[in-house]
Image: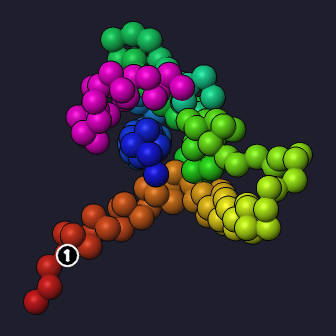
Amino acid sequence: MSSKNEYAILALIELAAHYRSGEPLQIRQIAQLQQIPDRYLEQLLATLRRAGLVRSQRGAKGGYVLAREPWNINLLEVMDCLEGSDAKPTDSSSPPKSVETAVILELWQEVNQAANSVLQRWTLQDLCDKRDARQQLDIMYYI
């Protein structure tokens, strides 16, 4: 996973955690909570806004909020938004140069399908729930 994807998902997890409150988070808040460089986060949020995953609110109490419910945003959608279709291998209309190339292409298509399947199953809400469960484990005392 690229740092771009990781930082964007961290920011989206933060927005998902605050979704029910309806209060927007400012870039500097998200950056501080998730240790993401402000300028980089600004660019990522602009990309996510253009894709319709987040909304921005202006004003003194402005910031960013999720555009949809966190259980309706899956990770495949996030990564597609950030990486675009260029990141995925495309089917070539020309035949492979060798049998070995054909075998390798088939393998990468299967890997890509498996990754997409996993990313499509996981939502921002799933990640928030998993984070909350891990935080609870860290708080527990064992005697």
Residue density around tag 1, few if under 14, some if 14–19, many if 20 or more, within 10 Å? few
Q: Residue at x 27, y 64 (%)?
A: 135
Q: Quadrant of the C terminus?
A: bottom left
Give the left or right position of residue 109, taking residue 55 as reference.
right
Q: Is residue 35 magenta?
A: yes
In the image, is residue 59 above or below residue 102?
Answer: above
Q: How many marks?
A: 1
| Residue linked to disc 1 | 140
Where residue 59 sits, quadrant-wise, is top left
- Counting from the top left corner in percent of width and height, residue 60 is at 33, 11
In the image, is residue 69 above or below residue 97?
Answer: above
Give the left or right position of residue 28, taking residue 11 as reference.
left
- Counting from the top left corner in percent of width and height, residue 55 is at 54, 25
Judging from the image, what secondary structure is the residue with disc 1 in? loop
Q: Nearer the viewer, residue 113 or 16?
A: 113
Q: Residue at x 69, y 38 (%)?
A: 85
Q: Is residue 26 magenta?
A: yes
Q: Which residues are magenta?
A: 25-47
Give the left or right position of residue 50, taking residue 43 as reference.
right
* Residue 114 can be seen in this image: yes
